[in-house]
Image (tube, rainbow, N blue to C red):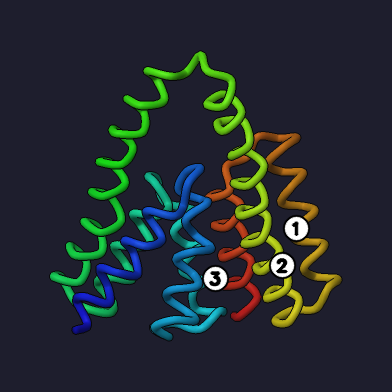
Amino acid sequence: MKQLNIFMAFFKSGMLGYGGGLSAVPLMQHEVVNTYKWMDEKEFSDVLALANTLPGPINTKLAGYIGYRVGGWIGMLNALIAATFPTALLMIVLLVFLNKYKDLSWVQGMAKSVIPVAGVMIGSIAWGMLNLSEKLMGWVPTLVISGISLVLMLVFSIHPALIILGILIIIFVQKD
């Protein structure tokens, strides 16, 4: 039953996460935290933050780790198959269909309307992480770290992984 739950959690989030890997994250979070209770909000946010520093699609990294944690090696393979195979198949079918009818106005409108929905889904996960950060550290440190990180990424083009590494170094140095 556990393997079926792993498959369904990542199958649903993969199939409904239209708009890219990040749009599947709130759906994964709902399944992992609320539906199956494999992690709490803080732990999911920690895993998400670490997964964001690694190369590759975020949804497959999360599926692989959570699947492994919940169901071992078989759970990892199960979660990866559930998160990738159905969406790859659906992507091929939809792209063939959309490419065939791409000049129709309703297809163009549908493609354009997905962008703000995906943006809202990504924004909702960001807002949730900001709220969790506020609960853990308070608003002032959250806003200061967020602001500095934003400037480092947008103005100086520093990769988020390097910013997270820098924060980890600062934390380890302060502990001594």
Residue 114 x/y as whole percent:
58, 39
User: Which residue carries the number 1 mark?
Assistant: 146
The Cα–Cα distance between marks 3 and 1, rounded to whole angstroms, is 15 Å
- Tell me whether the residue at label 2 lies in contact with that at label 1, contact meaning CB atoms closer than 8 angstroms: yes
Tell me which numbered mark, 3 or 1, is placed earlier along the sequence: 3
Residue 64 x/y as whole percent:
29, 62
Report crowding for label 3: few under 14, some 14 to 19, many 20 or more residues within 10 A (C-alpha).
Answer: some
Is 117 or 2 nearer to us in this picture? 117
The Cα–Cα distance between marks 2 and 1, rounded to whole angstroms, is 9 Å
SS at badge 2? helix
In the image, residue 84 above or below residue 113 = below
Q: Indicate the amino acid at tag 3.
A: Ser
User: Which residue carries the number 3 mark?
Assistant: 45
Q: Quadrant of the N terminus?
A: bottom left
Residue situated furthest left in the rendering:
74
In front: label 3 or label 1: 3
User: Which residue carries the number 2 mark?
Assistant: 130
**Residue in view at x 17 percent, y 62 percent:** 77
In front: label 2 or label 1: 2
